[in-house]
Image (cartoon, helix red, strand yellow):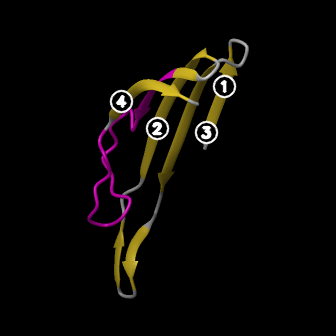
Amino acid sequence: AGIDYRFWEERARIALDVRGAAEAEDGFYIFRAKLDDFAVVDLAASVDIAENASVFVRGANIFDEQYQPASGYAAADAAIYAGIRARY
């Protein structure tokens, strides 16, 4: 589930996304494994600095939730990304 809010004459944006799973299982046939419940929060913001360019910052898994989306495969730790996006 997510929330996306635009403001400053639609030039700025803040987005919040929450995803997770509860009582999930992984595997096949008789080899089933119960996965731990988890909730992950991502946060992003961007501002248009020109008609065809914007700056952005995004935090993925901002609370550093340790989880496995599939048995034996750990998800990525918290991360921050920032940059300039240009369209031409």
Residue type at mark 2: give it.
Val
Q: CA distance from mark 4 to mark 1?
A: 20 Å
Asked if residue 24 is positioned above or below residue 46 in the image, the reply reads: below
Q: Earlier in the sequence, mark 4 or mark 2?
A: 2
Q: Which mark is residue 41?
A: 2
Q: CA distance from mark 2 to mark 3?
A: 10 Å
Q: Quadrant of residue 33?
A: bottom left
Which of the image's four quarters has the N terminus?
Answer: top right
Percent position (x, y) of residue 25? 42, 70
Q: Which mark is residue 49?
A: none
Nearer the observer: mark 3 or 4; the answer is 4
Q: Nearer the viewer, residue 67 or 5?
A: 5
Q: Residue at x 49, y 30 (%)?
A: 43
Q: Nearer the viewer, mark 2 or mark 1?
A: 1
Within 10 Å of disc 3 (Cα), the crowding (few <14, some 14-19, many 20+) is: few
Q: CA distance from mark 2 to mark 1?
A: 16 Å
Residue placed under numbered mark 1 in the picture: 5
Q: CA distance from mark 3 to mark 4?
A: 18 Å
Return the mark for residue 2: 3
Where residue 77 appears, as percent x and y from the top left, is 29, 41
Residue 10 x, y percent position in the rendering: 71, 19
The image shows residue 9 at horizontal and vertical percentages of: 73, 13
What is the secondary structure assignment of the residue under circle 4? strand
Q: Residue furthest bottom?
A: 29
Residues rendered magenta in the picture: 55-77
- Mark identifier at residue 80: 4
C-beta proximity under 8 Å, tags 2 and 1: no
Main secondary structure of the magenta stretch:
loop
Say which residue appears at 51% left-offset and 47% top-offset: 19
Q: Quadrant of residue 29?
A: bottom left
User: Which amino acid does the dot numbered 3 rest on?
Assistant: Gly
